[in-house]
């Protein structure tokens, strides 16, 4: 299942890896002044946290991407096998303009922003990640959502030749995720195409992945090739695997423990060995923006 190559990601790592945050900010300012330079230009967003982001190295070497293996380091070792250009996304189901869209069509006119979000994995670790992306609602409005649509389903590509983890039935491929339409249309929900001002690293879900910051990380599906608007709640990978442990909603909730561990606190990846665990926040700290989506729902049942 695992493919090891002589070269490590760290050997071919982009400059972000060795630049510190101050240099990065200076670099971003320089990029803004010189649009021809490499790197993605994106507006700042009021939705960003002011917490210090994790380093590029932490974000790109501690990953979950089972298509490339089960260990946290496997995606960084194996994901370079993935061909991300050309890339297209099938958009189908209850939409006005279904079709197979080239990534450039998906990106056309998309208002890119930097969104520095807290990211909380169901395994009780967390990071702060400076994504580059645009609101999913922008794309859904472009293709036109039909009135009967209530959910959005997403799929990752299946390509066992390039994704060694898919040679084993560790999950029922393709990786699938889903959102309720109001969650999908929420301004915090983005399709991310980069981080730290650079195109999305393959191990983080190149060339385009979902990011839903108030939900456990497994909802943020990587390397998306299909988006379907549906009337019924779609099947989702971890819920199919173990419905008792992984609900459809999977909102970050310190009061609803995972059957095998507490969700009351979390470990911030990269915090020193003397740093304690921090309290997990309801909706990962995004409650002011998203709690109203769930008014009237019992979140211990709809977990
Ligand atoms: N998407 C796909 N296709 N396959 C995966 O295994 N893992 C999920 C999510 N998206 C996963 C995926 C999980 S469990 C987490 S925590 C996040 O990706 C990790 O994102 P990161 O590696 O960019 O931090």
Image (cartoon, rainbow, N blue to C red):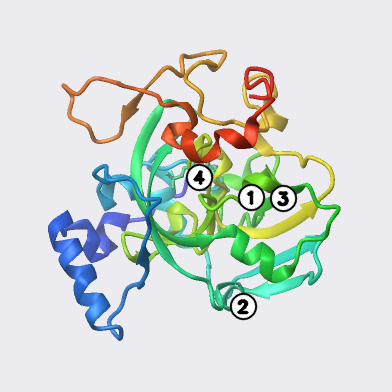
What residue does disc 1 label?
A: 184
- Counting residues from the start of the chain, the first of labels 3 and 4 encountered is 4
Residue at the spot 70% in from the left edge and 48% down from the top edge: 181
- In this view, the residue in front, 73 or 154, is 154
Within 10 angstroms of label 2, few (less than 14), some, or many (20 or more) residues?
Answer: few
Per the model, the C-alpha gap separating discs 2 and 1 is 20 Å
- In this view, the residue in front, 130 or 64, is 130
**On screen, residue 190 above or below 182:** below
- Marks 1 and 3: which is nearer the front? 1
Which numbered disc covers residue 105?
2
Residue 249 in the image, given as x and y percentages of width and height: 64, 32
What residue does disc 4 label?
A: 65
Ligand 1 within 8 Å of disc 4? The answer is yes
- In this view, the residue in front, 289 or 205, is 289
Ligand 1 within 8 Å of disc 2? The answer is no
Within 10 angstroms of label 1, few (less than 14), some, or many (20 or more) residues?
Answer: many
Residue at the spot 29% in from the left edge and 45% down from the top edge: 58
Q: Quadrant of residue 162?
A: bottom right
- Counting residues from the start of the chain, the first of labels 2 and 4 encountered is 4
Label 1 secondary element: helix
State which quarter of the image contains the C terminus: top right
Per the model, the C-alpha gap separating discs 2 and 3 is 19 Å
- Counting residues from the start of the chain, the first of labels 2 and 3 encountered is 2
What residue does disc 3 label?
A: 152
- Counting residues from the start of the chain, the first of labels 1 and 3 encountered is 3
Label 2 secondary element: helix
Per the model, the C-alpha gap separating discs 2 and 4 is 26 Å
């Amino acid at each position: 299942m695992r493919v090891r190559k002589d070269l490590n990601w760290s050997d071919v790592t982009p400059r972000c890896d060795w630049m510190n945050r101050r240099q990065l900010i200076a670099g971003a300012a320089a990029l803004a002044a010189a649009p021809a330079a490499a790197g993605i230009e994106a507006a700042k967003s009021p939705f960003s946290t002011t917490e210090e982001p994790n380093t590029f190295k932490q974000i790109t070497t501690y990953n979950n991407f089972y298509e490339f293996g089960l260990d946290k380091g496997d995606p960084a070792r194996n994901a370079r096998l993935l061909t991300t250009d050309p890339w297209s996304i099938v958009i189908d189901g209850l939409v006005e303009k279904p079709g197979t869209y080239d990534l450039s069509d998906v990106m056309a006119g998309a208002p890119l922003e930097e969104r520095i979000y807290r990211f909380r994995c169901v395994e009780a670790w967390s990071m702060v990640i400076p994504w580059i992306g645009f609101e999913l609602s922008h794309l859904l409005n472009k293709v036109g959502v039909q009135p009967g649509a209530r959910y959005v389903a997403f799929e990752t590509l299946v390509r066992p030749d390039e994704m060694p983890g898919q040679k084993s039935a560790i999950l029922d491929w393709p990786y699938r995720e889903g959102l309720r339409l109001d969650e999908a249309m929420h301004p915090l929900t983005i399709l991310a195409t980069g981080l730290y001002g650079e195109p999305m690293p393959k191990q983080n879900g190149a060339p385009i992945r979902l990011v839903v910051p108030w939900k456990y990380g497994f909802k943020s599906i990587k390397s998306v090739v299909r988006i379907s608007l549906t009337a019924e709640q779609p099947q989702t990978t971890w819920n199919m695997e173990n419905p008792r442990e992984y609900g459809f909603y999977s909102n970050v909730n310190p009061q609803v423990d995972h059957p095998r561990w507490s969700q009351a606190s979390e470990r911030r990846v990269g915090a020193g060995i003397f740093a304690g665990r921090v309290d997990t926040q309801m909706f990962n700290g995004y409650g002011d923006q998203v709690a109203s989506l769930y008014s009237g729902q019992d979140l211990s049942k709809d977990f």
